Image (cartoon, grey):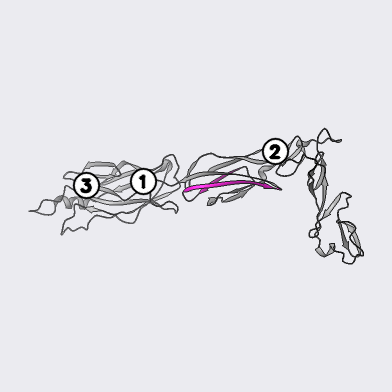
């Protein structure tokens, strides 16, 4: 909005601290009609509320007084008329140092609307909960204090809304496409910019053997995609479907080993998206038992293996499972034991 045209009448609010009942403007105890729109009846006397010959009109409800100003040489400065620096003005004022009104810009000492022209972000994708995306808006003509009038909206984000900044960092606790809107709306100046970003959960993991601890094989896993930082999350295991214990036989002293042992384990995700170790083991007594049973004339159960179905998910709400049901495999061989998880395997002599 450029107010350079002298035909445009700009209205400026003359600051008034008075709060006036509506009935005071209608006459009350005063005789005759109101002399000008800016007079109020106080007692039995009409009183000029603006004390200005330039007063054009008054608001009957609030008592605010309005007057017009010359768009060539004047602008509104906190409710007062002030001179601009132009060749047509008899008095010069440094326009760049003048307060031309919050959120307005100044071009050749003319009041203009700043308009948002772009919104950018420091990344196009972020990990759910763990990463923030920083958004920045720019404006033209980029003059005045327009940043103070920027309103942000980010449904589901943290924060979901804010005000008064050109830059804002936001995170989300659920995955999907998210839309961020920045709006500049002030006294007839209105513009906005939007940007979509993608918030992601872990989509899988890779696994590698780490170490042996007695009969236990330890495996470390790394969440993917590795381009995102999931180090604020916690993962856990739960039973899948399709487990099968190939070492068990009828009359075995042990139950089938076809479910995850003990309480359901959880692991914090560490730097680099690594978590673990996940320990896989038969236990020494079962190893000895299946190497020597069932007794003759049947052959011992070993060599044999069991397949235990495992599903991995994220503990925090907003993501859920990141692997399908898949098998952990443990072998008992004649002189060795072995284990595998998600394509990684290890074996060792035992005992």
In this rendering, position of residue 202 left or right of residue 172:
left
Say the numbered circle drawn on residue 276: 1
Q: Residues within 10 Å of mark 1 (few under 14, many from 20)?
A: some
Return the disc, 1 or 2, that comes first in the chain's sequence.
Answer: 2
Instruction: Identify the image quadrant of the N terminus.
Output: top right
How far apart are the alpha carbons under marks 1 and 2? Answer: 54 Å
* Viewer-nearest residue: 184 or 311: 184
Q: Which residues are magenta?
A: 166-186
Residue wearing tag 2: 143
Q: Main secondary structure of the magenta part?
A: strand
Instruction: Identify the image quadrant of the C terminus.
Output: top left
Residue 43 vs 228, above or below: the answer is below
* Picture residue at 36% right of the left edge, 44% below the top: 205
Q: Under tag 1, what secondary structure?
A: strand
Say the numbered circle drawn on residue 181: none
> Can you tell which quarter of the image residue 46 is in?
bottom right
Q: Residues within 10 Å of mark 3 (few under 14, many from 20)?
A: many
In this rendering, position of residue 10 left or right of residue 193:
right
Q: Under tag 2, what secondary structure?
A: loop
* Picture residue at 51% right of the left edge, 47% below the top: 178
* Viewer-nearest residue: 272 or 44: 44
Residue 155 shows in the view? yes
Residue wearing tag 3: 331
Return the disc, 2 or 3, that comes first in the chain's sequence.
Answer: 2
How far apart are the alpha carbons under marks 3 and 1? Answer: 21 Å
Closer to the observer: label 2 or label 3? 2
Q: Residues within 10 Å of mark 2 (few under 14, many from 20)?
A: many
Return the disc, 3 or 1, that comes first in the chain's sequence.
Answer: 1
**Residue lying farthest front?**
7
Q: Do the CB atoms of the residues marked 3 and 1 lie less than 8 Å apart?
A: no
């Amino acid at each position: 909005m450029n107010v350079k045209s002298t035909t445009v009448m700009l209205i400026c609010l003359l600051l008034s601290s008075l709060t006036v009942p509506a009935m005071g403007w209608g006459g009350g105890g005063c005789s005759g009609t109101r002399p000008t729109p800016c007079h109020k009846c106080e007692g039995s006397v009409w009183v000029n509320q603006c004390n200005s010959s330039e007063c054009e009109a008054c608001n009957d409800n609030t008592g605010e007084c309005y007057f017009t100003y010359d768009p060539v040489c004047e602008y509104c400065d906190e409710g007062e008329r002030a001179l601009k620096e132009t060749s047509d003005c008899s008095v010069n004022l440094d326009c760049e140092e003048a307060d031309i009104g919050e959120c307005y810009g100044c071009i050749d000492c003319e009041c203009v609307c700043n308009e948002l022209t772009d919104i950018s972000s420091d990344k196009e994708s972020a990990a759910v909960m763990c990463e923030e995306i920083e958004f920045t808006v720019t404006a033209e003509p980029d003059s005045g204090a327009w940043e103070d009038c920027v309103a942000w909206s980010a449904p589901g984000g943290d924060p979901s809304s804010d005000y008064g900044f050109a830059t804002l960092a936001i995170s989300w606790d659920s995955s999907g496409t998210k839309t961020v809107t920045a709006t500049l709306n002030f006294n007839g100046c209105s513009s906005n910019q939007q940007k979509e970003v993608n918030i992601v959960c872990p989509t899988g993991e890779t696994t590698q053997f780490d170490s042996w601890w007695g009969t236990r094989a330890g495996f470390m896993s790394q969440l993917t995609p590795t381009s995102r930082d999931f180090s604020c999350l916690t993962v856990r295991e739960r039973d899948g479907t399709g487990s099968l214990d190939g070492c068990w036989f009828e009359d075995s002293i042990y139950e089938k080993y076809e479910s995850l042992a003990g309480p359901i384990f959880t692991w914090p995700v560490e730097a680099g998206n690594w978590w673990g170790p996940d320990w896989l083991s038969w236990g020494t007594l079962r190893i000895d038992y299946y190497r020597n049973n069932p007794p003759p004339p049947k052959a011992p159960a070993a060599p044999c293996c069991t397949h235990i179905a495992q599903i991995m998910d994220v503990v925090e709400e907003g993501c859920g499972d990141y692997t399908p049901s898949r098998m952990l495999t443990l072998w008992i061989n004649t002189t060795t034991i072995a284990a595998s998880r998600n394509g990684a395997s290890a074996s060792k002599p035992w005992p």
